[in-house]
Each structure stands twice: as structure tokens, then as C-alpha cells.
Amino acid sequence: MNYLGAEYRLQEISPEVYEYHAKRAAQLQIDKKLGGMLRSIATDYPELPDSIHKYSYVLQCRYRHGGGLYSLAAAAGISALREVNPIPEVPLLSPKDWEKTVERTNRLGERPGVDLLESLSGIALLEIYGCNPGYIDGYQETMDKPGLTRFLGFSGLGTVHAHDLMHFASIRG
């Protein structure tokens, strides 16, 4: 199976794995320790938490909300995917993986009709669903709640970024 023009190498996760990591990330965010979770995931790429927080800040400035859910979803996604795709099966994340992830997001935003964050993340989530449905099912079961629906573009983008980071790392391995 291919994803973004390369062989898909990530192991599929169950919705329960995603949900577990999302709940853990939410509690850490409440406790103001989400940065610690990101640092523990990214021991190989120490700048990753800063990159995610900067991207979150850009979203916060542009849309006036949602940056926190973006960070939470990114941390949960990376943590969940890493649980079933351990090192060395999927190599350590690198700055190049982040660059490719952001480039992909920018290309998605250039597609005709993609004028909302929700449509951008929605397209990418559908593409991911084709190769890792459990990951997307877990995201939807966790984030598609009445109080969070207005933030689905943000949490969706964080979920996409986590997946794409891990995918780009996997094809380097």
C-alpha cells in the first residue's frame, strides 16, 4: 500500500491506543506538562516540541483559538503511533520529517476549494484512513465530541502532523 507516493510502513493501531494517549495528553495539558510529554517522545529531535508549539502559536494568532488542541492531538498521535512503531522499526524523528510534514500541509492548502482548516485536515484524515483506519477511528472517537466540534480543524491537523511525521521517519528506515 502507498501513502504520499511511498510504501506505507507504519503498523496500524487500534482506536483504543489512540484514545489512551489522547486522554493522557489531555491530563498532561491540564497539568501544564504537555511539553514534557512532547520532550519524552522527541528525545531524538529536541526541537520538535518547539516546532509544534510555534505552529500552535501561528494557529492561535491566525484563528484566535485552537492551538492547544492542535498540540494535544499532535502529542497524542505521535505517542500512540510510537507505541506500535518502536525504534528501530521506525527511526527517530528528524527535522527533515517536520519540514516534509509542513510542506505537505502547504500543498494541501493550495488545492482548489481548500479554504478552511477543517477541509484541509479533513482531506488529509481521509487519506490516512485509507492506510490506518484505527488511528483515524481513535481520533474521531476521542475528539468528535459536542464541546470540541468547533475545534476539529485544529485537532485534525495535529493528528495529521503526528501521522505524517512518523510516516516520513518510517520511509527513511
Image: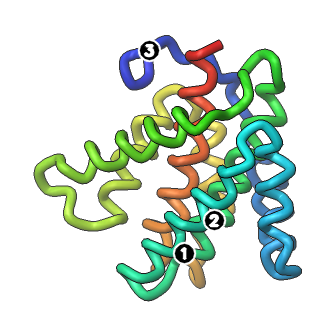
Which amino acid, mark 2? Answer: Ser
Give above or below for 31 relative to 160.
below
Q: Residue furthest left?
A: 112
Between discs 2 and 3, the one toward the N terminus? 3
Q: Secondary structure at mark 1?
A: helix
Q: Position of residue 111 (x, y in %)?
A: 17, 47
Of residues 9 and 56, which is closer to you in this image?
56
Give above or below for 45 relative to 19.
above
Looking at the rendered structure, which numbered label has been put on residue 168?
none
Q: CA distance from mark 2 to mark 3?
A: 27 Å
Identity of the residue drawn at 67% across and 34% down: 93
Q: Are marks 2 and 1 in contact (CB under 8 Å)?
A: yes
Identity of the residue drawn at 30% across and 59% down: 119
Q: Position of residue 91 (x, y in %)?
A: 72, 22
Res 8 → quadrant = top right
Of residues 148 and 50, which is closer to you in this image?
50
Identity of the residue drawn at 56% across and 16% down: 171
Which amino acid, mark 3? Answer: Ala
Which amino acid, mark 1? Answer: Gly
In the image, 36: left or right of 67?
Answer: right
Q: Position of residue 169 (x, y in %)?
A: 61, 26
Q: Residue furthest bottom?
A: 64
Pointer 3: what residue?
A: 6
Res 153 → quadrant = bottom left
Q: CA distance from mark 2 to mark 1?
A: 6 Å
Looking at the rendered structure, which numbered label has been put on residue 71?
2
Q: Position of residue 121 (x, y in %)?
A: 40, 54
Pointer 1: what residue?
A: 67
